[in-house]
Image (cartoon, rainbow, N blue to C red):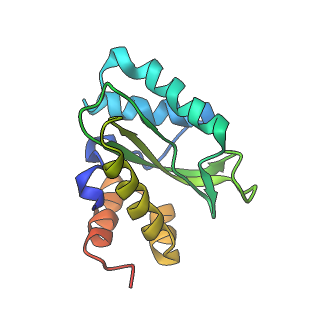
């Protein structure tokens, strides 16, 4: 699975303004809402579902990266977005570091394979230090889209 299969380009945010975990999750869900990828009626429920998932254990996986995600019946296909926080946000990460890179996913409950493949793709790409460094330095949505396309074309992972 490639980023282009699930990342909503219209929802990418290169300058997140939130300063806490719930705020950044709401900001990214709102980005999906503004892009037309989720319905307004489902916004609060999706945020609650992601926060409930966070209670099981932080999706802040370390090295300045978090992958908040949930399954939700309101979506027909896997949808995701990317956000970058210049200053970083305290996200209760496994390594205690602030998070700068966010990949938020919402998938239908009846498509667990897509959900797992997307998480696998994200984690594989994020193991590449160059990819992460460029993503953290991205100043525009276009920069991020280009990086995701390059990752899809295997220009980072060997």
- Write the residue at 24% across / 56% down: 4
x and y percent of residue 35 in the render? 27, 33
Q: Measured along the vertical axis of the image, is residue 1 above or below residue 38?
A: below
Quarter of the N terminus within the rendering: bottom left
Foreground of the two, 8 or 108: 108
Residue 20 visible to the viewer: no
Q: Quadrant of residue 78?
A: top left
* Residue plotted at (33% across, 40% down): 11
Residue 156 visible in the shown view: yes
Q: Is residue 84 left or right of residue 118?
A: right
In the image, 119 versus 26, the foreground residue is 119
Please give the name of the residue rendered at 37% of the width and 48% of the height, measured from the top-left corner.
Answer: 115
Query: Residue 129: x and y, percent?
Result: 53, 76
Q: Residue furthest right?
A: 96
Q: Quadrant of the C terminus?
A: bottom left
Q: Quadrant of residue 21?
A: top right
How many numbered marks does the figure carry? 0
Pick the residue in front: 12 or 46. 46
Q: Find residue 81 and report its horizontal and vertical position in percent.
A: 37, 45
Q: Residue furthest bottom?
A: 158
Image side of residue 99 versus residue 69, left or right? right
- The residue lying toward the viewer, choosing from 33 and 6, is 6
Horizontally, residue 142 falls left or right of residue 90, namely left
Residue occupying image coordinates x 61% and y 57%: 61
């Amino acid at each position: 699975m490639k980023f282009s299969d699930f990342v909503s380009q219209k929802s990418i945010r290169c300058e997140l303004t939130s300063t806490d975990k719930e705020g950044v999750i709401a900001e990214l869900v709102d980005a999906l809402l503004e892009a037309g990828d989720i319905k307004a009626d489902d916004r609060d429920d999706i945020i609650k579902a992601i926060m409930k998932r966070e209670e099981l254990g932080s999706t802040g996986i370390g090295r300045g990266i978090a992958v908040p995600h949930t399954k939700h019946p309101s979506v027909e296909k896997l949808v995701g977005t990317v956000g970058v926080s210049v200053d970083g946000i305290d996200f209760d990460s496994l390594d205690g570091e602030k998070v700068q890179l966010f990949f938020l996913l919402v998938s239908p409950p009846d498509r667990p394979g897509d959900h797992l493949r997307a998480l696998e793709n994200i984690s594989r790409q994020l193991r590449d230090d160059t990819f992460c460094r460029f993503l953290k330095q991205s100043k525009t949505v276009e920069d991020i889209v280009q990086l995701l396309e390059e990752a899809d074309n295997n220009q980072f992972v060997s």
